[in-house]
Amino acid sequence: MAEEDVIVDLLRRKLSKEGEALALALAIYKAFLNKGRKGVKDAVLRWLKEVESHGATHKKDKS
Amino acid sequence: MGLLIKKIRVSGFRAFDKGIEVSFDRGINIILGPVGSGKTSLIKAIEYALYGTVIEVKRKLFKRSDLVNDFSTEAQVVLELSRDGEPVSIRRTLDKKGRENLVVTIGDREYSGAAAQKAINGIVGLAHDDFAHHIMLNYRVLQEVIYGSPSARAIAIDRMFGIDLLEEVFRSVPLQDVKRRLRELELERDRVLKTIDSLGSLESLREELRSLETTKKAVESELEELRKEREALRKKLDELRSVADKYYEIKSKMERISGVIDYYRRRYGRELESARMTFASYVRKITDLLVEALELEYEVKKAQELKELVGQKSGEELLLILQAHLELAEEGRERLLRELHEIESEASFKRREIEGLRREYGRILAYVEELKEVKNRLKQLESKYGRIEEVEEKIDKLKSKLTTILESRKVLKCRLLILKEMLKTRSNECAVCGQPVARQAIEERFKTALAQLKEEGESPSDIERQLDVLEKALEEMRALWERSVELEEYRVEAENLEAKLRDEEEEYRELERSAQEYRVKIKELAALLRNARVTLRLAHRYNQIVKASEEVAKSERELEKLKLELSKIGFNELEYEQLLEKEKELTVSITQLEGKLGRLAEQINELTEQINEYRALEKELEELENKIRAMRALYNNLLLAKNAFREIQAELRERKLALMKKKASEAFKRMYIYSDYDDLDIRVVRIERGEGGYQRSIYDIYARRTRDGAWVPVLPRLSDGQKALIALILAVALYGLAEGTLGFILLDEPVPIVDENLKKALLRGIKELGIGQIILATQSESIAGEPGVRVINLKSVA
C-alpha cells in the first residue's frame, strides 16, 4: 500500500465517528499534497468565508 | 537490492587532473589512500553525478566552477549504475564557466537536459539534502547527529521515518485564523446584544408607539376644527377689507401729516410764528454789513447793486445773492491782504536798504573825524613853526648860517693847530709865511685864537638841532597836508550819503503808514465779514423755519379735509380690530398644534426606526449566532482533523522507532567491543507547548551502563569516540529504515577518532546489517586487510 493510502486509511479509522472532521482532514491532506502549506491555508480561509456567508462549509469542497 | 554503483570514470574533477576509472562490487568496497589521494573527491564525484552539484556548493561554501580541477579545462564524470539489473548511465561534463552537459541512459532510453535530471530523481528517489545526511556519511555529518540541535535531529529522523510530511500538514492548518475570527464574531455578537439591551423591550416600544398615534389623531381632529373656524373668520374679514383699507389709508395719511406738524412744532416751537420777521431783520443786517464792507473795498458799484437786489428777491434766491456778495467781499479782503503783503515786503526791502546806507555812512564818518584831527594838528604845527613855506625858508637860512660858522671855525682850528705846533717845536718862524715871530706873540696869538673859538656866538650843534626840529616838523606838516587832501573827499561823500539817507527814511515811513492803514481796514473788514457770515447762517436757519411754518399751515389744512372724509366712511374700527385679533389667535393656536403634530410625527418616526432597528438587530444577532455556531463547529472539526495528523504521526513513529531501536541495539551490541556500555536506546520526548497539541517530538539517545545497568544520556556521559561510533550506528540503522530506492551507502572516513580494533568491529557490524553496497573511504590499512572486502587502492589505480 502506498504511503498516501496508508495515511488516508489511518485518518478514516481515526475520525470514523467525526464525519465533518474527517472530510476536513481529507481535504487538508489533499490540499497539502497538491499545493503544500499555502494550499491548506487557502482552503481554510475559503471555509472561513463560506461559514461567514452561508453559515457552513460546502460539502463539495470537503470531499 | 535497489540501485547499485557499478563503475565511475572521473577526469578533471577536483583532485583528479588525469582520468581515473574505478569499479565497485556488491558488499564492502574500501577506497584506500593517503591524505590528498582523492578519496573524498571520488565520493563527491558520485554525488555530483547524481545531483549535478555537491552539498558544499549548495551551502555556498565554494563555487560550482571550483569542482573543475585547476589544471583541466573541464570536468567529466561518468557513473554507471544498476537498478535491479537494468543498466543506468549518467554522464556529466562541466566547464570552468559552470556550463554543464548531462546525458542519462536507462536501459535503451537516453535523456538529456532537464528530462535527464528528472529521470535521475526518479531513480534515486531521495532529496539531495537527505542524500547528504543519510547516504553520504562522513565524520562531520555524524557529529551533527549527536551535537546537532534536538529539533534538527528530530526533523532528520522523522524524514527518514517518512512521517515529516504529517508534521508539516499539522503545522500548516491555520487554526489561529479561525479562532481569531470566532473571537471577532463573538465580540460582534456581544456588541449587538448590548445595543439591543440599550433599546429596551420591543413590547414597550410598541406600546409607546400606539399611545403616540392616538395622541396624534386627537391633535389632528382639534386642528381641523380650528382651521374651519379660521376660514369662516377670514371670509368675514375679506368682506370688510375694502372699506377697512380705505379707512386705514386715510388714517395713515392723517397720522403721517400729524407727525409732520408735530415734528415741526417740537423742533421750532414759537419760532414758527416770528420766523418771517426775524428772517427779514437778519437780511437787512447782512445787507448793511456787506454794503459797508464793499464800500471799504472801494466796490461802491457792487454795494449799490446789492441794495437794489435785496429789495427785489426773497427766500432762497435772496440768500444766494447775499452769499455771493459775501464771497465777493471776502475776495476783496483777500485782495487787500495781498496788497498789504506787497507794501510790507517793499517796506522791508527799504528798511534793509536804509540799514546798509547807515552802515556806509558810519564808516565814512570815521574818515571825517580823522580829517578834523589832521586839521587841528596842522593848525598847531603852523602856530608853532609857521606855515610850510615859512618853515622852508627858516631851514634855508639856518643851513647857510651853519655853513658860515663851520667855515670860520675851520680857519680858527687851523690857526690853533699851527700855533700849537709852533709852540711845541719852539719855532720862531711862522709856519705859513716863514716870517720870524716872537714866542710870546705866538702864545698871545694862540690864546686869542682859542678865546675866539670859544666865544664864537651860536655853536653849530645848536643850529643843527634847530634844523633837525624844523625838518621833522616840515615833514609832518607835509604828510598832514597830503592826508587832509585825501580825507576831504570822504567829507563830501558823507554829506551826500546823509542827504540820501534822509530821503530813504522818509519813503520808508510813508510805506509804514500805508501798511498800517491797510491793516486797520482789513481788521475792520474781517469783523464785518465775520458778523455777516454768522448772520447769514442765522438767516439760513430762519429761512428753513419759514418754510416749515408754511408746511405746517398746509398740513393743517389737509388734515381738516381728511377728517371730514373719514367721518363720511362709517367704519367700526374696534369691531374690525377684534376680528383681526381673533384671527391672529386662531393662527397661533393652529401653528402650535401643527408644531405639536410635527413633533409627534418625528417621535413616531423615531420609534418606528427604533423598532425596525430592534428587528434588524435581532436578525443580525440570529445570523451572528448561526455564524458562531458554524465557526465553532469548523474550529472544533479543524482541531480534530489537525490532531488526527499528529496522532497518525505518533502511531507511525512508534512503529518505525521500534524497528530502529531494535536495529540500533543489535548493531551496538555487535560493533561496540568494549564492556562499559552494553545497549543503546532511543526515546521520544514530547515538548508540550501551545494549544491544539504538543509542539514537537524529539529523540533522546541513551546507552546502558554495564556497571549499574542505568540508562544514561549519550551526549554528556560518553566520550567523543563512543559518540562517533553511536552516531554511525544510528545513521546506518536509519539507512535501513529509509524508503528510498538506493542500495548503497557512502562512508567517507566516518569515525577517524576510534581505535583500529573498534574500526574493524564497526566494519564487521556494518557488513551484517545487510546493506547491498558499502563504499568506505579510509586511510586505515588495517581494516583494508579484513576478509570479504574489496580494496581499491587509489595509489595503484592512478
Image (cartoon, rainbow, N blue to C red):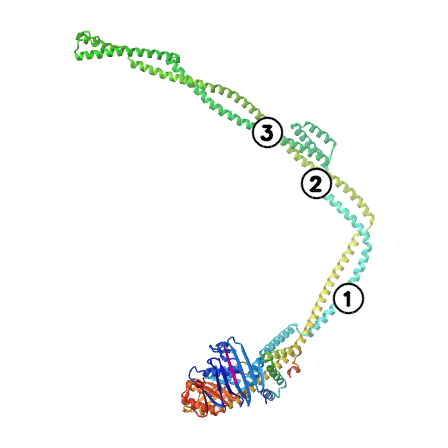
| Image position, residue A34 (x, y; %) | 61, 81
Query: Spatial distance from mark 3 to mark 1, Cα to Cα?
Result: 101 Å
Marks 3/1 in contact by CB < 8 Å: the verdict is no
Residue B504 visible here: yes
Q: How many marks?
A: 3
Quadrant of image for the C terminus of chain B: bottom left
Instruction: Please tell me if label 2 and label 1 are on a single chain.
Output: yes
**Res. B280 image quadrant:** top right
Q: Amino acid at mark 3?
A: Glu
For residue B457: magenta? no
Q: Assign a secondary structure to mark 2.
A: helix
Question: Disc 1: which chain?
Answer: B
Q: Assign a secondary structure to mark 3.
A: helix
**Along the line of sight, which residue is nearer the eye, B748 or B455?**
B748
Q: Amino acid at mark 1?
A: Ser
Residue depth check, mark 3 versus mark 1: number of the one nearer the observer:
3
Left or right, residue B166 beside residue B258: left
| Image position, residue B721 (x, y; %) | 42, 86
Name the residue beneath numbered marker 3: B342
At a point 80% along the width and 52% down the height, the residue shown is B244
B159 above or below B508? below
10 Å crowding of disc 1: few (<14), some (14-19), many (20+): few
Name the residue beneath numbered marker 2: B268
Marks 2/3 in contact by CB < 8 Å: the verdict is no
Left or right, residue B481 beside residue B465: right
Q: Which residues are magenta?
A: B73-79
Question: Disc 3: which chain?
Answer: B
**Would you say the magenta stretch is mainly helix, strand or loop?**
strand
Name the residue beneath numbered marker 1: B221
**Along the line of sight, which residue is nearer the eye, A13 or B343?**
A13
